[in-house]
Amino acid sequence: MAPRRRPYVRSAMAPSQPPPMLASGPLGWLRRNLFSNWWNSALTLACLYLIYALAAPLVQFALIDAVWQGADREACLPAKGQGAGACWAYIHAKFGQFIYGRYPAAERWRVDLVFLLLAGGLIPVAMPSVPGKRWNVLFLLAVFPVAAYILLFGGWFTLPRVETARWGGLMLTLVVAISGIAASLPLGVLLALGRRSALPAVRLASIVFIEFWRGVPLITVLFMSSVLLPLFLPDGVHFDKLLRALIGVALFSAAYMAEVVRGGLQAIPRGQYEAAMALGLGYWKTMRLIVLPQALKLVIPGIVNTFIGLFKDTTLVLIIGLFDLLGIIQLSFTDPKWASPNQSLTAYLFAAGVYWLFCFGMSRYSLFMERRLNVEQRS
Amino acid sequence: MSNNAADHGGQGAPRGGDIAIEISGLNKWFGDFHVLKDIDLKVYKGERIVICGPSGSGKSTLIRCINRLEEHQRGRIVVEGIELTSDLKRIENIRREVGMVFQHFNLFPHLTTLENCTLGPVWARNMPKARAEALAMEYLERVRIPEQANKYPGQLSGGQRQRVAIARALCMNPKIMLFDEPTSALDPEMVKEVLDVMTDLARSGMTMLVVTHEMGFAREVADRIIFMDEGQIVEENEPEAFFADPRHERTRTFLGQILS
């Protein structure tokens, strides 16, 4: 027979204690993460060497050997300068062109004003703590596009007209990217809803649209829009080249966006639809208030991914004769005044830096939004 | 629409009141599977009906047909004098009069408790926001969690979530409340807080259809208990007689299994 055990009754409840301190300080961190054993130490050292090997020439080229000032190519020739470094003087001299393209110098204030309006609308919208979101969004969606159109294109009031053929540089890149982003998200949402619709005609139309635009390279779309489309249009019907490119880019990215959003829609459990329906909400209200806010939040990484892809794809408008940032940079190579061995390398470095800044900014902001939205609803 | 429930009235209404829901000759299939077979049921205003039965017996499907979360293929369902057809406006009108509480709560996770409750009144009933909020607080008070108004569903316990779901449904001022196994997904220690709220609601005279296995609740609150099996109503009786003297073999087996 098993011995009888005495009953156990706890006399006092154990208090909660703070977690034990791990090795603290930066040294502790280094040891834990980089040098925890001989193999990891070797890897760390190898990686450090690799970083050095890659970064050192870049720093040498872009900073140490670089030429910062000069009036023309003379300054950047290897014989005159100390070494074969980046020719920043050339970027400095061409900066206006890179930003505004061939926009007339006297009218560039209009572009600046549009940039300012955009920043003034976008920054408060992006900061959650700023009140008055409704008016802010209304400004961005209704007032800003009209104002930007009037200012950039002109022809109204006393503003002289500036044909889109003269637009270029970063300004053109931003026009294409922002209108593409602004049009592709709502269109993509509609297409995603259409693809999941109970109405066969709507569903079929959405599927055909999405699969068509996703199946064609953007280059083809742009090329068709600028070369083939005019052939089909009756004589005398003029369609602005930039506008055609904008529509092409918007529809193209809408198709991608639709599939991203559809992924989010599929993740929303049926119970959410049922609960909304049980309250007597109709289809559109259910989508707008219940389903889309949750679905879009889930696919923020995918949405921003598409935005970033779109931003970089704007460089393709080069092939239809529009000079975006990259296009205008390449165009400037033909200027004999600045011809030097490092001209193109410098310019491409500059272009890469500008694109990277915008894309990295979008990426960081999306991370910030994700984290913010998750804190609210952590379960 | 006129109250065509009157055409069918007169066959021994136990309480003699008006009819809230009338179901006649209801049949439903999921593909080839015949889930509901010739269901006839009248629910009088203020009546509390508990529906029980083994899983797969069609009890949830039955109450989901009442607010058209499931479409029936044959038969008539008349709710508050409005017959359910595929007319969307009519369906939305019925849904506004019929509150529903789900097994898995189905709260909206991106909205606070208060917003969950005001959503229906504001967007389906066009109530001004301030009034909807006052109403919501009143019902959150009634389900005893006014202090959780600004929390998100993810921050609440299961029992609290289900009470929010009840408050959310009540905010629409429904004439009928449907409960689809409201306590089945709860930890045992939270079942009582939800049942207490439901008991309060029953005492206030709400018409209720409750699918549940909580036989204690059924005994205390129900006017009638309906036992379903294989898509049919097998037995229907007042609680005392239902528990003391089940007539049908299947009812006896079922009660033997869950009351042991």
Image (spheres, coloured by chain):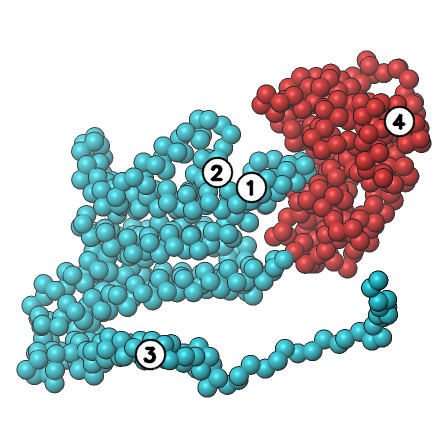
Q: Is any atom of residue A89 visible in this view? A: no
Q: Chain of mark 3?
A: A
Say which mark, if any, is on residue A356: none
The tag earlier along the polypeptide, 3 or 1, is 3
- Which residue was labeled with disc 4? B246
Residue at mark 4 shares a chain with residue at mark 1: no
Query: Relative to residue A106, is residue A330 drawn left or right?
Result: left
Q: Chain of mark 1?
A: A
Shown in cyan, the chain is A
What residue appears at the point 80 percent right and 18 percent down from the top-left corner?
B5
- Front disc: 4 or 1: 4
Between residue A272 and residue B124, name the one nearer to us: A272
What residue appears at the point 91 percent right and 17 percent down from the top-left corner?
B12
- Front disc: 3 or 1: 3
Measured in 3D between alpha carbons, the distance from the residue under mark 4 to the one under mark 1, in whole angstroms, is: 47 Å
Shown in red, the chain is B
Q: Chain of mark 4?
A: B
